[in-house]
Image (spheres, rainbow, N blue to C red):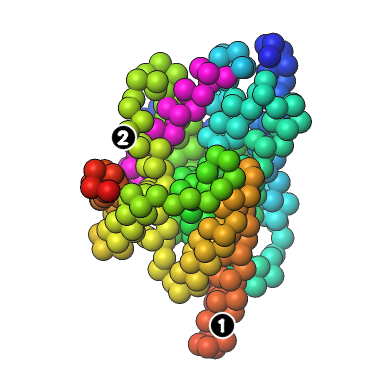
Amino acid sequence: MNMSTAFVLTIVIALGTYLLRAVPALLLADRELPVPVQRALRNVGPAVLAALVVVSVASTADGGIEVEVAEVAALVAAGVVAWWRRNLIWSLLAGMAALWVTLVLV
Amino acid sequence: MDEPPRSAPMSASVPPGGGPGRIDRRAIVDGFPLFVPAVPFGFVVGVAVVESEMPAVVGWSTSLTIFAGASQLATVTLAGVATLWAVAVAALVVNSRHVMYSAALAPTFRHQPTWFRWVAPFFLIDQVFALVALRPDGSPASFRRYYLTLGVFFYLMWLAAVSLGMVVGPAIPTGWRLDVAPAVMFTGMVVISLTRSPAVVAAVVAAAVAFLAAGLPDRLGILVGAGAGVLAGAVAEARLVNDRAITDEQEFTP
């Protein structure tokens, strides 16, 4: 791929990425959204992040679904510690520790 | 995060109009733990840039222009392999969840000046959204400073991680499984954000549906799962209101 084609391609994708992030906020900012819609939008964070986690550990490159024991152990440990300590660093350390321990044991 | 943001008297790193032109040290403190797990992902992108059919300098520049890890990864790995249209579509679809972040922030942007509404979306990555969504509403000026400090912080750190990844990424043993770190971190963030029952419903339904849809191409399962979770959360919100017969409109006024 030559330099100019590659550059134009990345600029188009950059513009598209920006528009995905900007258009809803720009269009909706000055409108009073119906209360049910406002309520629905409150849970976007937990919903998107939960889906992101599941897809990133469960999907395989060839379009299959596969779950690895060590990854599940890591996520469970991270979740339990996050609930208990309310602290992201401890949660991350616990998750990675559980991952490595399980990889060694299983 | 309840205390008012403390500002560091450092050089201006926010555009004019962003208050007194100071960075919000609190944003750095909050953002740093979220950046650490993003480092291995930056390395993965860095390695992919080196191996790409695309000239390395253009692949590297996607950190400056696209600033979205999954889109950058799709762009550099598919360039030269798929048709140009396929590359562009795949790169945009993998990050379509950002549309939902943008809609969710619209009520907050209402109190912000026009320049901020145009600049802020460029920095709307997962970590920035998750942190500003957890943050109790302060004044528009302090929100702006917090948001922009986070955005610029992640932008610079991401660029550093991808650059470093191009150099040292290939030397890190894959056996360390650092690729799992972002998922582990996001799990912690989800759990910490589950302070209300509708949020629990939204997260559980999103996870279950995303699992069933995980085989869809271009990571579309994220969008399908998230959509189902948001809908289920909305139903749970409505039931909560009916059960307690309360009106919670006030909660939405920052």
**Front disc: 1 or 2:** 2
Q: Is there one chain holding both mark 1 and mark 2?
A: yes
Range of magenta residues: B24-52
Secondary element at image label 2: helix
Q: Is residue B87 above or below residue B140?
A: above
Quarter of the image containing the N terminus of chain B? bottom left
Residue situated in front as seen by the camera: B110 or B59 = B59
Residue A69 in sight in this render? yes
Q: Is residue B30 left or right of residue A4?
A: left
Q: Which numbered dot is residue A60?
A: none
Of callouts 1 and 2, which one flags the residue occurring earlier in the amino acid sequence?
2
At 39% from the left and 22% from the top, the residue drawn is B169
Q: Residue furthest front?
A: A106
Q: Chain of mark 2?
A: B
The reply to whether residue B202 is in sight is no
Give the percent coordinates (x, y) of residue B141. 50, 47
Distance in Å between CA atoms under marks 1 and 2 = 45 Å
Q: Which residue is mark 2?
A: B176
Snapshot quadrant of residue A36: bottom right
